[in-house]
Amino acid sequence: MDRLALILVIVGAINWLLVGLFQWDLVAALFNGESSFLSRIVYSLIGLAGLYSISLLFRERRTAS
């Protein structure tokens, strides 16, 4: 679950980078507009992954033995 959340957060970060630098929304381009059903699902999954990733800040780190 952690890896999936991390992948989605990275996708979201890359998307925001593209929006910030080039005013181009990758998710909207892939799924036929930002208000399409699939785009909204992807945006929602990325948002949920971001919320889930907050829990990573408060977890104990395991040390490799």
Image (spheres, rainbow, N blue to C red):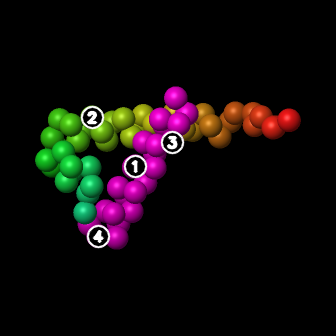
Is the C terminus in the top left, top right, bottom left or bottom right quadrant?
top right
Name the residue: 46% across, 43% down: 7
Residue type for callout 3: Leu
Residue 20 is a magenta residue: yes
Q: CA distance from mark 3 to mark 1?
A: 9 Å
Q: Badge 3 local density, few (<14 within 10 Å), some, or many (20+)?
A: some
Residue 21 falls in image quadrant: bottom left
Q: Residues within 10 Å of mark 1 (few under 14, many from 20)?
A: some
Q: Which of disc 1 and disc 4 is earlier in sequence?
A: 1
Q: Report the amino acid beneath label 4.
A: Phe
Report how far apart the C-alphas of labels 4 and 3 lie in the structure: 24 Å
Q: Which residues are magenta?
A: 1-23
Labelled disc at residue 6 = 3
Residue 27 at x, y percent in the picture: 26, 49
In this rendering, the label closer to the viewer, 3 or 2: 3
Residue 15 falls left or right of residue 37: right
Residue 6 highlighted magenta (yes or no): yes
Q: Which residue is mark 1?
A: 11
Which residue is the site of mark 4?
A: 22
Can residue 31 be seen by looking at this rendering? yes
- Name the residue nearer the viewer: 11 or 50: 11
Q: Amino acid at mark 2?
A: Ile
